[in-house]
Image: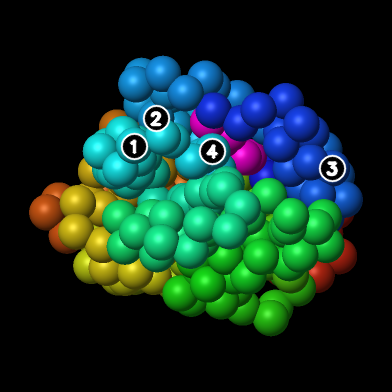
Amino acid sequence: MTVLNVMCIGLEPDVLEHVRLAMDYRWPGVHMETAGADRAAPRRTWDAQPDLVIIQQLPGHAEMATAISEVRSKTEAPLVVWGREGDEAEAVKTLEMGADDYIKPNCGLMELMARTVALLRRSRTRPLASSDLLASGSLRLKPRYERAFLGNDELKFTPTEFRLLHLLMSRRDSVVTRDLLRNALWEGRSGADSLIKKYVQRVRQKLQDDPREPKWIASVSTVGYRFVGPPAPASRHEAESGV
């Protein structure tokens, strides 16, 4: 299954453990990357490839605004601020700065898990198809479970990487424009073009696909991308067995 990647910035040990318990209950094997509250920490979000970013409330508005801006420049992932108890003004200000949610310290495990599920669901502007199998040669996607296989090997995609590949595969031989990708995966956010390029590069790397001689994803100059993989196997049994 896909692995949920959570980037935690400046979380105190007890808060980090609380978050870990909530995430692992819903997403067993969750990968949590941690960073201190120093100024360079938000810049590490790109390397972490997060699906969710959680930042503990910083002392000053300027510092908080800078951290949120830094994260937003590196990833489209939902951004949560772990705040302080009873500080409604801080919550409002933080949300106005661009955070997606503000969580107070008394938030229980089940509520934290439910808020995370809701954030991830809202970040998907285009739901996955209900089809239980999408295949091209030895490449198989199971959209319902967000699982991908190449031959007998399961590929580890982040949710955004999976949705990108699913979008391309479901429009086989058609050009998927950057505008469509921007709107479907990043809510039309300005500056998403660099993210599109980097996510396509990641998917290609996991498929071991050479963009100069593409077997799966071809670039269409100035327009977008096209999935060029081989036809699906003749039978469902062949698709599921990887023959």
- Circles 1 and 3: CB atoms closer than 8 Å: no
Q: Secondary structure at mark 3?
A: helix
Report how far apart the C-alphas of labels 3 and 2 lie in the structure. 23 Å
| Chain-order first, disc 3 or disc 2 | 3
Mark linked to residue 223:
none
Residue located 69% across and 81% down the image: 130
Distance of mark 3 from mark 4, alpha carbons? 17 Å
Which residue is disc 3 drawn over? Answer: 21
Image point (19%, 59%), residue name: 190
Q: Position of residue 242 (x, y in %)?
A: 79, 50
Q: CA distance from mark 1 to mark 4?
A: 12 Å
| Mark toward the viewer: 3 or 4 | 4
Indicate whether 116 appears above or below 37: below
Element marked by disc 2: helix
- Residue 235, x across and y down, in percent: 78, 70
Q: Between marks 1 and 3, how big is the CA–CA gap?
A: 29 Å
Indicate which disc, 1 or 3, sits on the residue closer to the N terminus.
3
- Residue named by callout 4: 56
Local crowd size for mark 3, using a 10 Å CA cut-off: few (<14), some (14–19), many (≥20): some
The region drawn magenta spans 5-9
**In the image, 152: left or right of 115?**
right
How far across and how far down the image is residue 97, in percent? 30, 55
Q: Tell me the mark number nearer the camera, choosing from 1 and 3.
A: 1
- Name the image quarter holding residue 120: bottom right
Of labels 2 and 1, the one closer to you = 1
Q: Circle 2 sits on which residue?
A: 42
